[in-house]
Amino acid sequence: MIDKQQVKLHFSKNASNYDQYAHVQKKMNDILIKFIIENHKDISKINNILEIGCGTGYLTHSLTEIFPSAHITAVDIAPGMIAEIKSKFKNNSVDFICADIEEIKLNNTYDLIISNAVFQWFNYMPATIKKLYSALNQNGIICFSTFGEYTFRELNECFNQTKQSLSIKESIHPGQPFYSLNELSALCKNSIANETNNYEKLVESKEIFEYEYFDNCKDFFYSIKKTGANNSNKSNRVISPKFIKKVIDLYNENFREDDKVKATYHCLFYKIIKQ
């Protein structure tokens, strides 16, 4: 389970420097936008948009350019992120709400519900997708990106090797587990199965891999911290300095390319259509 209070704290604390380090999230944003509009016959019919996890407004800005006549409700769980986006984003067609989308009641309906790199922080994915689907207008779309099972595979491998070398049997992970492309596709379909008989054809998905390179493992850790994407598991046990040092040494030794250490991002994209 994700500790949402920690999520609020981490993202609020790093709101001012998020854009400087969120390189992969920005690439995912651009791919997500293309994923929305491809094969969409008439985007002019998208008049009411719900954005989940608006952060500093990178996706919000894209939406105002592509859908200039639409009203956007932008939601984020972190007060610091809402304060950051309000300080630099002036647009009468956008309303900002600080809330956990898994907890709030949706009183309106939407033509588009969109989210970039946020769904990995959900604790109740099936129920939340079902709620969002119910809030769509006819022919409305849920379009979101998230991270998949191979994200940070290098770090996970170093954790597993360190557990073996130190004879640790308890469960220790660098962060929350992620879905595979097929697992999350099945979850999306099952979540809307009671709402439509055509659910198998109404979910589209794709995956890409992005990579970042750093001088060393500590720089990689620092970049994660500065986006606010720290480990926020409720059951997260305290990890000893000895364990972390071993992980860092293994990472620096085993995952170098052209004198840089590599970090893998497995990016998943989904489109759910209501018919």
Image (spheres, rainbow, N blue to C red):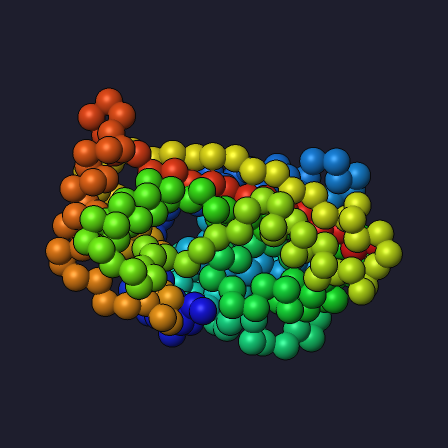
Q: Residue at x 42, y 44 (%)?
A: 151
Q: Is residue 256 left or right of residue 127?
A: left
Q: Is residue 36 left or right of residue 259?
A: right
Q: Residue at x 50, y 73 (%)?
A: 99
Name the quarter where the N terminus is drawn: bottom left
Q: Residue at x 56, y 38 (%)?
A: 207
Would you say residue 225 is visible in this rendering? Answer: yes
Observer-nearest of 193 and 156: 156
Would you say residue 87 is visible in this rendering? Answer: no
Q: Is residue 274 left or right of residue 59?
A: right
Q: Residue furthest right?
A: 197
Name the quarter where the C terminus is drawn: bottom right
Observer-nearest of 135 and 243: 243
User: As displayed, is residue 244 above or below residue 254?
Assistant: below
* Residue 240, quarter of picture: bottom left
Q: Where residue 60 sits in the image (x, y, percent)?
A: 53, 52
Q: Where residue 212 sits in the image (x, y, percent)?
A: 34, 35
Q: How many tags in the picture?
A: 0
Q: Residue furthest top?
A: 258
Q: Residue at x 38, y 42 (%)?
A: 153
Q: Is residue 108 left or right of residue 11?
A: right
